[in-house]
Amino acid sequence: MTGQKLLFVFNPASGKAQIKNELMNIIDIFVKGGYEVSVHPTQKKNDAFYYISENGLRFDTVVVSGGDGTLNEAVNGLMSIDIDKRPKFGYIPTGTVNDFATSLNISKKCGVAANDIISGEPFSFDVGRFKKRYFAYVAAFGAFTDVPYETPQQSKNIWGNLAYIGEGIKRLPQISPSFIRVEADEKVIEGEFLLGLVSNSNSIAGMKTISNKNVSLNDGLFEVTLIRNPENPLSVQFMLSDLLQKKLDSKYIYNFKTSKIKFNSKESISWTLDGEYGGTTKRVVIENIKEAIDIRVRNK
């Protein structure tokens, strides 16, 4: 591996800024692993995306450290590079929740994650395409999906997951359903929905997904969960009971797999991509790009 070039992009403000205390150890691990290392601390939002898309071709491996937002920028940067020239990927999670890392069993300890990038095995994971953007593990609309990107970074640093819960409670009075037509394969579903998830993950917002045991990150399929709007307070209780019991298909919950899905709504709805704001739209086609990026993960 001697002589290979590695680009290390990190978000110095992610999580509790723990990367600052681990930086020299991480670089030392990479150098001892035979890499010529270049380091770039992100300076502002979308910096990881632009830096990787503009410079990624010069490197054999790109390693990113940060939360899910930094991860999303990195994935978009890598996807801007032709697949036959796309560098290998490594991820050191330092965010508050780190859903993607949880799904791939990537260590939250920086030194361990760095060593796993050096000595681990390659794994090709699916990437979602949302119009001209990409996401690593989830595209979502509806109730509470704005919480991760609206929660102040200072609150996340101090309170962790509790910060998300606090922001969610403040938004309860603002929740309103959206009437949406959903098309996937031969399936057509219409109705008012509180929440929709198009995911490729065992964990979302730090919690296990409803289809946790049936998730594969490289099968070319999304796990889709749609939650209907309950008609009255009693219906809310039934819906919550179905969620707690993980009833994958009920009157209020739809759960299925697909490689491509279309959403059409009467009004523009807001989306999040990997917990970051994804824009508003009335129509969108979401596609799964099978095994799009090679990442180094811990040996099984």
Image: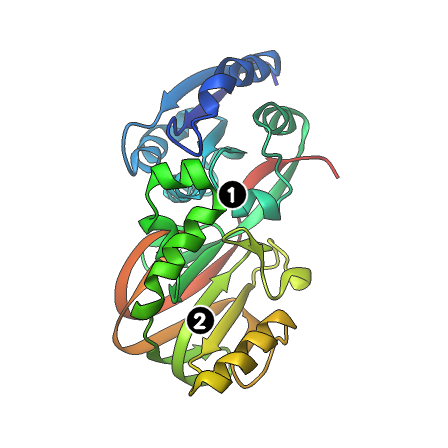
Nearest to viewer (mark 1 / mark 2): 1
Crowd band around label 2 with a 10 angstrom C-alpha radius: few (<14), some (14–19), many (20+): some
Residue at (26, 67) in percent of width and height? 281
The image quarter in which residue 114 lies: top right
Crowd band around label 1 with a 10 angstrom C-alpha radius: few (<14), some (14–19), many (20+): many
What percent of the width, then of the height, locates residue 186? 51, 83
Q: Nearer the viewer, residue 30 or 147?
A: 147
The image quarter in which residue 247 lies: bottom right
Is tag 1's residue or tag 2's residue first in the polypeptide sequence?
A: 1
The residue under label 1 is which amino acid type? Asn
Tell me if residue 251 comes above or below residue 201 in the rendering: below
Q: Is residue 256 left or right of residue 70?
A: right
User: How far apart are labels 1 and 2 at the CA level?
Assistant: 25 Å
The residue under label 2 is which amino acid type? Ile
Q: Residue furthest right?
A: 300
Q: Which quarter of the rendered picture does the C terminus lie within?
A: top right
Residue ID for mark 1 = 98
Residue ID for mark 2 = 261
What percent of the width, then of the height, locates residue 268? 24, 71
Residue at (52, 19) in percent of width and height? 22
> Contact, CB < 8 Å: mark 1 with mark 2?
no
Q: Which type of secondary structure does the marked residue at label 2 adopt? A: strand
Q: Which type of secondary structure does the marked residue at label 1 adopt? A: loop
What percent of the width, then of the height, locates residue 243? 58, 72
Q: Which quarter of the rendered picture does the N terminus lie within?
A: top right
